[in-house]
Amino acid sequence: ADKKGKPGAEKAGEKLELSPYIANLVKKFELDLKRRAVVGSSECAVMTLTVMRHYVSKGKHGSVDALLKGVKTIGKRLAAANRTQLTIGNAVRRVLHIIRQVAAELKQEDQGGLTAIQGLPVEIDRSRSLMKVLDKTEPDVDLKMSMDLNARQLIIDEISEMVEDIERVYSHIKAYSVEHIHAKDVILTLGYSNTVMHFLAEAAKLDREFEVIVAESAPGYDGHKMAKLLAKAGIETTVITDSAVFAMMSVVNKVIIGAHAVLANGGLVARSGAHMVAAAAQFHSVPFVCVTGLYKLCPLYGFDQDTFNDFKYPGEILKFEEKFAEKVNVQNPGHDYIPPQLVSLFVTNFGGNSPSYIYRLLTEYYDVEDYDL
């Protein structure tokens, strides 16, 4: 069954015993994802963590191994419900990493690994490195260790802290705007992004005069919404059509956009049209900056424009009432894949990083065995 892929996963999911409360919670969220009732990267991540927190608290698991298998099985179901929302898988991988981390720390504590001064467990770094491989000093996780109330509470506290970090991500990211936006700058952005809007609005509070050019991002035209909010914040704003991006790039100092997901190779998945903006920025030697939260960091790779794309309603481009609509094939992609060579810098809630450093962040946030859910 395992060799066949999906059937094996379904059988594993059937063996998982869930209480009626947890089963209903998972099923409801799964249906919401399939119906696109829950949209947005942060909303999907927070809801996934909430489900996992309930499962850790009230689920039936006697050991670390049982908890890991249960979390992974539920995570597979949720990730399969909407494969374009990569933050669901990211949240599940982070929970798996937390469970192993807590188990390793408790094992160290049981073996007497306490600090001499504070009497607290030593925080263990389980990230992979060449030195640990050569020295064989990587701490093992006791998969048979029982999940008592203390262990569960530690895991629940870590998950709750993750939820708070996601909810406070805008306040953390916008604090770095002072380092990247300067007086007399001309900044170009594409469409509407909550993260970018907070980032630019915070810089405007510092009495720095700068101008923002907003590409309208057809066919949704949410660049108009972005322009209105920036104008309310006192920022000089200009709206342009998407086709005028290349012509306007010669007067731009830097490009700042948000991201749907940051991939393992340092590339990113962003809204449709972002690849055109990135290519124009590279041609004019303009820095291309992506502002995003680390909860969007994904250990998967994108090799083409279709890997993580989501095709939207074609009626946004061509109305079905048109006489020739039946004879036309209309594609309305929701996202673009931008390779790492087009990205200059990532600004996250923990500071700025180059695309080449993403691999290191992955080792700190996730375990290698969880990359493929």
Image (spheres, helix red, strand yellow):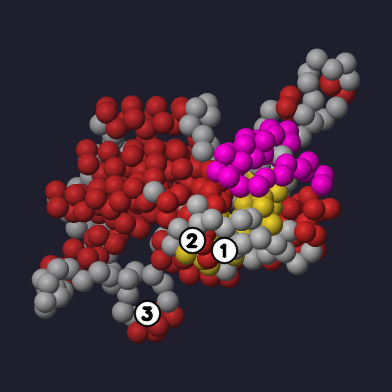
| Residue type at the position of mark 3 | Lys
Question: Which residue is located at x 42 percent, y 51 percent?
Answer: 171
Q: Whole-percent x and y of residue 202?
A: 50, 52
Q: Which residue is mark 1?
A: 180
Other residues around mark 2 within 10 Å, as few (<14) / some (14–19) / many (≥20): many
Residue tagged 3 = 132
Q: Can you tell which of label 3 and label 2 is closer to the viewer?
A: 2
* Element at label 2: loop
Identity of the residue drawn at 33% across and 39% down: 50
Counting residues from the start of the chain, the first of labels 3 and 1 encountered is 3
Q: Amino acid at mark 2?
A: Tyr
Residue at 45% in and 39% down: 44
Asked whether residue 149 is in view, the answer is yes
Badge 1 amino acid: His
Mark 1 and mark 3 in contact (Cβ < 8 Å)? no
Please state which of residues 176 and 207 is positioned toward the viewer in this rendering. Answer: 207
Instruction: Give the labeled residue for mark 2.
Output: 176
Mark 2 vs mark 1, CA separation in Å: 7 Å
Q: Are marks 2 and 1 in contact (CB under 8 Å)?
A: yes
3D distance between C-alphas at marks 3 and 1: 36 Å
Magenta segment, which residues? 217-244
